[in-house]
Amino acid sequence: MKKQSKNANNRPKTSGEDFNSYFRPQTKEGLMQVLRDYEDALTVIAGGTDLLVEHYNNLYKVDRWLDLNWVSEFKEIKIYDDKVEIGSMVTHERLYKLDKIKELFPVIQQAAADVGSPQIRSRGTIGGNIVTSSPAGDLLPPLLVYNAKLKLISKDGERIVDANEFFTGPKKNVLKKGEIVEKIILPLRDEMYRGAWVKVGKRKALVISSISLAFNIVFDEDKKIKESRICVGSAAPTPLRIKKAEDELLAKKINNVNIEEIAQIVSDKISPIDDIRGTAKYRRQVAFNITKSALNEVINQ
Amino acid sequence: MKIKLTVNGQKREVDVKPHTRLLDLLREDLGLTGTKEGCGKGECGACTVIMNNKVVASCLVLAPQADGAEIQTVEGLGDKEKLHPIQQSFIETGAVQCGFCIPGMIMSSKKLLDDNINPGDEEIKRGLSGNICRCTGYVKIVDAVKEASHKMQSGGEDNV
């Protein structure tokens, strides 16, 4: 059992002792070496904007930090003909300021701009957002609507997991001990696509969302809907795709969509709870409203 | 472990533990108590400093992560004889009440004005969105940043 204490006097604050328990590999190869040596006994830190809050609140004992901030390959964004690869240590600030992300994945760009505050966006990372796996993680619905895949590495090898299958519960995911998210792979589409992002919280800034919604709709040459992805955050144990609403949109022209009907499906299909950020009833009503506004936004684009 | 960093232009070398926070390093090891601890959770912005040209909550940065970094704190901006135009503007517009949040506000304002010398209202609000003040209604703080913008544009390099 981890002991919890809120006594600030217990906070470790003496500097000056020598420690060997902070690892900061500069390359992927260096990282693999640390993983081989200490696989089971590492506390992995990315931006620290979630992890350190919990760490100092609960005063967990950490034997070995593994800091991913220095791994140069993890900060790269690579653009290919058919995909974009985003390193797991790319910060929210970079995501929302990069024109290329705005052009290719506007829903990710808008969600990144809505994360926390300047102080949080400058440190917090896309990989950290994914691994923390909060149902309220702002980047998660956008990743799901763009069919993102995650490349995971460990000392035993690597595997690719669909973002849609990564999250299993609140703060739970399929990541195994000793596994690290290396990068996020986003397929590029030739067809025209349009998206929308809505985040609702108690304040405009520095807020954990009460509910959020990401949309991406892909059109064929006749401007009929070829594929659609709708994902809601903070309304279920994981970011939740609303498949019934997605299917309802297929093969229709966007102007012929019954917006109220889609909004009702989204509102019915989520499984929200009552908590500090809103009641379940409130969330269902807001889900209805923001689905309508998001669809209208896509129509007007 | 020993780390080296530059704080307000001065090279410093400090012995830290891996879990020492940058905030503690600044306040306790270097005695720079201008940077405040409010919530300790990255929500209030009182501990804001500029690290490698980015605003960070120093309560959410491990000291070893600042190894090799360039840090600016409120102490690096001006002194009693010659205040930085941002500091002067906060005084002149009455933006300071209890003062606890002000070092963080000033550092966020500094970064905001470094990036954009003439920000609009919305840009100012967004730039300061990570800093909470519990005394004022923010109106005078926004005024202060506008005043600082005027001062820095008309005053030239000498004032900045």
Image: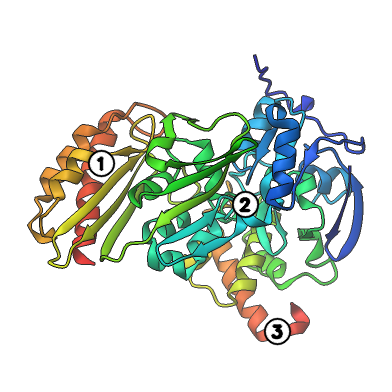
Percent of width and height locating residue A113: 46, 57
Badge 1 amino acid = Ala
The answer to which image quadrant residue B12 occupies is bottom right
Q: Nearer the viewer, residue A7 or A23?
A: A23
> Which label sits on residue A123?
2
Chain to which mark 3 belongs: B
Q: Is residue A191 left or right of residue B61?
A: left
Are discs 3 and 2 both within one chain? no
Disc 2 to disc 1, C-alpha distance: 30 Å
> Which label sits on residue B155?
3
Percent of width and height locating residue A216: 28, 54
Judged from the image, the secondary structure of the residue bearing numbered disc 1 is: helix
Judged from the image, the secondary structure of the residue bearing numbered disc 3 is: helix
Badge 3 amino acid = Gly
Nearer the viewer's eye, disc 3 or disc 2?
2
The answer to which image quadrant residue A12 occupies is top right
